[in-house]
Image (cartoon, helix red, strand yellow):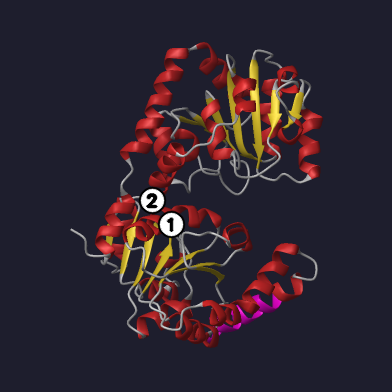
Amino acid sequence: MKLLYNFAIGCYRTAVSIAGHFNKKAQKLSHGESNALKQLQANIHPDGNYIWIHAASLGEFEQGRPLIETLRAKCPNQRILLTFFSPSGYEVRKNYDGVDYVSYLPFDRSCNVRKFLDIVKPRQAIFVKYEFWYNYLHELRQRNIPTYLISSIFRKEQIFFKPYGGMFRSMLRCFTHLYVQDKSSLELLSQIGINNATIAGDTRFDRVITIHQQAREVPLIEQLTNGHFSIVAGSSWQPDEELFIRYFNSHPELRLVIAPHEIHEEHLASIEAQLSRPHLRLSQANETNIAQVDCLIIDSFGLLSSIYRYGQVAYIGGGFGAGIHNCLEASVYGIPVIFGTNYKKFREAREMLTAQCAFSIENYQQLEKLLDYLTSHPHYLEKTGRTAHNYVHNNAGATNIIYNDLFNIK
């Protein structure tokens, strides 16, 4: 199995290299990975002794960020290395100043792994939520380097729990300890003999509370939404937009802020083509013309987590595609969230549905009925928002649990 795995990794690396001639993301991954060891050799302190934190992409980084920033605040002299596998994480956070160095993770080939660990000389390795690399994990164990998985969540349909998943179970046994989000994950691990695990919760709750406390004011959006029932649609895709824009077009009393997942010109033009009411892109808006529109399209990144504060309801995109985006960023402001049908992989979405502060819709008719009810029943709207706020705050604290355990602080 190991030979087959290494062969597959080699094929994947070749495929990425070839795809790089046609695809910008693949090109960045291929270039970044191929230069990672050289850059690490030039920039890593020769004494090593890093705490190495690995995040697959941007979402996992945000999940690990509370632990990184707690570590930096309490141990300012400790060297920290942050690695990404995906360009969507590295390219956005390559200049993140909360660590000593940010790098692509070299592909999981035995020669890369040995060179990487020889350069970094990590004292600990921390993987965030996912990412199971056979050679990295086994080499870390062979070198007796404490290795941890944080904010992880497991589901029974994953390969670890299949009869043919022996190689993947061996990766789990390489971890010194696993910090899982819920009881179900703990029980699944126990069933395959993995007992070095603790329920710590999800560090994303801590992260969104921090974001809420540091939220930026956006005066133009405040001017647009002030005095109006407003919907903020975050990380939306076309199937989402077809639904909430249709509702918005037929309800002149509403205001709408759209922060689409993709902001390339084709997508922005598609959104504008669907809108029958006055609208602007944020990049075109000013104090004068914002008064003439009912909808603002956010054509830049980095504002969404602050924008949710201006809505009475949030629509979270992705539920008619690969899966919903982060609904906690909206819920922390005490507003209910709405999303499509593909939410089952997300524990917080399931729990919020049960608590009745989140709602899943299958089609326009369900969205229309729900929004009609929320807009006409202010007491119910307030109740659902309060429940959402309490849900987020009641689940905070994972960062301190993990930090105190990892660094023996009682």
Specify whether residue 1 is in view.
Answer: no
Q: Position of residue 61 (x, y in %)?
A: 49, 57
Query: Does the stretch in magenta take in 10?
Result: yes
> Which residue type does callout 1 highlight?
Gly
Q: Is residue 41 left or right of residue 272?
A: left
Question: What residue lies at 42% left-to-right and 46% top-to-bottom?
Answer: 207
| Secondary structure beneath label 2 | loop
Magenta part, dominant SS: helix
Question: What residue lies at 53% left-to-right and 39% top-to-bottom?
Answer: 305
Residue 396: quadrant of the picture: top left
How far apart are the two marked residues, 2 and 1, measured between alpha carbons?
A: 7 Å
Which label's residue is closer to the chain start, 2 or 1? Answer: 1
Q: Position of residue 65 (x, y in %)?
A: 44, 55
Question: What residue lies at 38% left-to-right and 57% top-to-bottom?
Answer: 67
Q: Nearer the viewer, residue 361 or 377?
A: 377
Residue 366: quadrant of the picture: top right
Q: Position of residue 104 (x, y in %)?
A: 57, 70
Q: Residues within 10 Å of mark 1 (few under 14, many from 20)?
A: many
Query: Does the stretch in magenta take in 143?
Result: no
* Marks 2 and 1 in Cβ contact (< 8 Å): yes
Question: What residue lies at 43% left-to-right and 25% top-to-bottom?
Answer: 385
Residue placed under numbered mark 1 in the picture: 64
Q: Which mark is residue 203?
A: 2
Q: In the orientation shown, which residue stands out farthest toward the left?
A: 410
- The range drawn in magenta is 3-15
